[in-house]
Image (tube, helix red, strand yellow):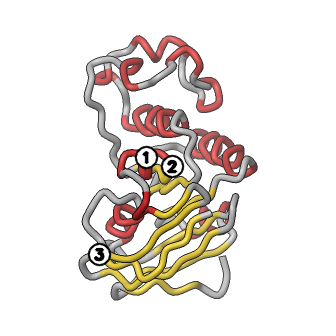
Amino acid sequence: MLEAINLTRLHIGPVNLCLADGEVVAITGPSGSGKSVLLRAIADLDPNEGQLKTQSGMRADTPAPDWRRKVAYLPAESGWWADSVGEHFKAPNQVDLASLAIAPEAMGWDVARLSSGERQRLAFLRLLELNPDVLLLDEPTAPLDAENTARFEARLKRCISAGVSVVLVTHDPVQAARIADRHFVLADGQLAEAAHV
């Protein structure tokens, strides 16, 4: 579960949003409307005001690194800080690479050789190692083809079935309808629930 009360950051808000365990909310809106800004605020990556809580507790009572493990953010372009893929994982031999059609030897690859789609899929698996309560996904399938998008969504549905709540930013209304329980539109700094997913 995730609850945001009067969340404000730059030109966004106040935002009030509540997700149940295993619920998926899609957020759409024009480019530049602040969708990524909102996700980064929920993840506590940028200064913001308001209250946030999950089943693990209030953000105000949680050290920032712990909050970011439980409320995990996947940006549109993932960061990589070491030379090899495997160095970015706690338990590289236990990662379910097959679920996203990634070669078993990928953990030994140099990050520089990864395509944008491979980076995105591996970054998602890296995030799942944190065992988050909430996933904040910012255009997660933008660099993926249709087959890999389907694999990504299937892997995501396993998380949802396990009770993980998801906030999905997407420009694809078909994807929003396919995955989300509810659909919100962010425009002029305000988040409003759409009539239909």
Residue drawn where x is 25% and y is 66% of the image: 47
Q: Earlier in the sequence, mark 2 or mark 3?
A: 3
Return the x and y of residue 196 as percentages of the image width and height. 67, 82
Q: Position of residue 44 (x, y in %)?
A: 35, 60
In this view, the residue farthest toward the right is 161
Residue under circle 1? 66
The quadrant of the rendering that contains the C terminus is: bottom right
Q: 10 Å neighbourhood of mark 1: few (<14), some, or many (≥20)?
A: few
Could you tell whether 28 is left or right of 154 in the image? left
Of the two numbered discs 1 and 2 in the rendering, the one whose residue sits closer to the viewer: 1
- Residue identified by numbered label 2: 70
Front in this rendered view, residue 12 or 117: 12
Residue closest to the far front: 61
Q: Is residue 113 visible?
A: yes
Q: Residue 29: x percent and y percent? A: 43, 77
Above/below status of 99 relative to 155: above
Callout 2–callout 3 Cβ contact below 8 Å: no
The three-letter amino acid code for the residue at tag 1 is: Asp
User: Left or right of 151: which side holds 138?
Assistant: left
Residue 127 place in picture, x, y as percent: 48, 39
Disc 3 on helix, strand or loop? Answer: strand
| Disc 3 residue type (three-letter) | Arg
Choose mark 2 or mark 3, whichever is in front: 2
- Frontmost of labels 1 and 3 is 1
| Secondary element at tag 1 | helix
Image quadrant for the N terminus?
A: bottom right
Of 69 and 161, the residue lying toward us: 69
Which circle marks residue 9 in the picture? 3
Q: Is residue 13 left or right of residue 155?
A: left
Marks 1 and 2: CB-CB under 8 Å?
yes
